[in-house]
């Protein structure tokens, strides 16, 4: 549970603490430095744990805020027979605010506002359970929910949809006209 470099946290290693201690207190011979090493190692562990706990607390707060936002959303008009079959496979921790579905081999990655997870199901079967009113297929491997598109951009070869969770979804030629008719491509 240590801090990673990408988290913006300051990470001190034992060697730096020994150097800092010897510079601040007094120059020490090599033998005394060996006595300081366990103290420096302990201090390094304590600092790393404190930073890790702070980062974990911040991530939990962000997740709680997102759960509260999703809970405040109005209940979607789900078809009585289709959507419950699909959502019974979705892990409860992901909620029901569906953003996108992505096919990965024989699995289906479900992207929601709270995260993503894999389930064993074909994309074709998931689309049949969800119905046509909840979103549209934009690629042979991707389905995007209504209201999930934040913007559209274009890479070197094809248009991309940027979803509200930051996910970038390719749009294939096969589905490009349908996506344009939906108003998702600018």
Image (cartoon, helix red, strand yellow):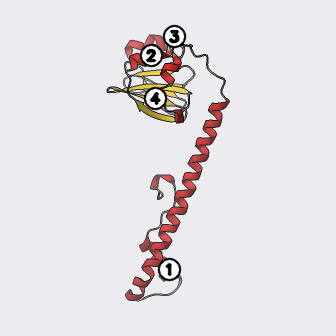
The nearer-to-camera label among 2 and 3 is 2
Are the residues flagged by discs 4 and 2 in contact, CB closer than 8 Å? no
Q: Secondary structure at mark 4?
A: strand
For the point 36% across and 23% down, the residue is 157
> Which residue does the numbered mark 3 point to in the structure image?
181
Q: Secondary structure at mark 2?
A: helix
For the point 42% across and 87% down, the residue is 32
Mark nearer the N terminus (1 vs 2): 1
- Horizontal and vertical percent position of residue 9: 52, 58
- Horizontal and vertical percent position of residue 139: 40, 19
- Separation of marks 2 and 3 at Cα, in angstroms: 19 Å
- Separation of marks 4 and 2 at Cα, in angstroms: 12 Å
Mark nearer the N terminus (4 vs 2): 4
Asked whether residue 186 appears in the rendered view, the answer is: no
For the point 52% across and 57% down, the residue is 52
- Separation of marks 4 and 1 at Cα, in angstroms: 51 Å
Q: Is residue 43 above or below residue 108?
A: below
Tell me the tag on residue 21: 1
- Horizontal and vertical percent position of residue 149: 54, 24
Q: Residues within 10 Å of mark 1 (few under 14, many from 20)?
A: some
> Which residue does the numbered mark 2 point to in the structure image?
127
- Separation of marks 1 and 2 at Cα, in angstroms: 63 Å
Q: Is residue 10 above or below residue 41?
A: above
Mark nearer the N terminus (1 vs 3): 1
Where is residue 79, by image quadrant?
A: top right
For the point 47% across and 78% down, the residue is 39
Mark nearer the N terminus (4 vs 1): 1
Mark nearer the N terminus (2 vs 3): 2
Q: Secondary structure at mark 3?
A: helix
The nearer-to-camera label among 3 and 4 is 4
Tell me the tag on residue 110: 4
Q: Secondary structure at mark 1?
A: helix
């Amino acid at each position: 549970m240590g801090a990673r470099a990408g988290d913006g946290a300051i990470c001190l290693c034992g060697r730096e603490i020994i150097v800092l201690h010897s510079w601040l207190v007094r120059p020490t011979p090599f033998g005394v430095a060996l006595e300081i090493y366990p103290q420096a190692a302990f201090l390094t562990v304590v600092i790393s744990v404190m930073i890790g706990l702070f980062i974990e607390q911040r991530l939990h707060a962000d997740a709680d805020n997102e759960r509260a936002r999703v809970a405040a959303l109005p209940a979607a008009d789900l078809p009585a027979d289709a959507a419950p079959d699909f959502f019974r496979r979705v892990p409860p921790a992901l909620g029901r605010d569906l953003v996108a579905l992505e096919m990965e081999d024989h699995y289906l990655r479900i992207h929601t506002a709270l995260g993503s997870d894999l389930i064993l199901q074909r994309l074709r079967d998931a689309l049949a359970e969800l119905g046509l009113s909840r979103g549209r297929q934009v690629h042979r491997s991707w389905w995007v929910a209504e209201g999930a598109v934040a913007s559209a951009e274009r890479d070197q070869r094809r248009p991309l949809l940027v979803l509200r969770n930051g996910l970038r979804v390719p749009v294939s030629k096969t589905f490009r006209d349908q996506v344009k008719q939906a108003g998702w491509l600018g």
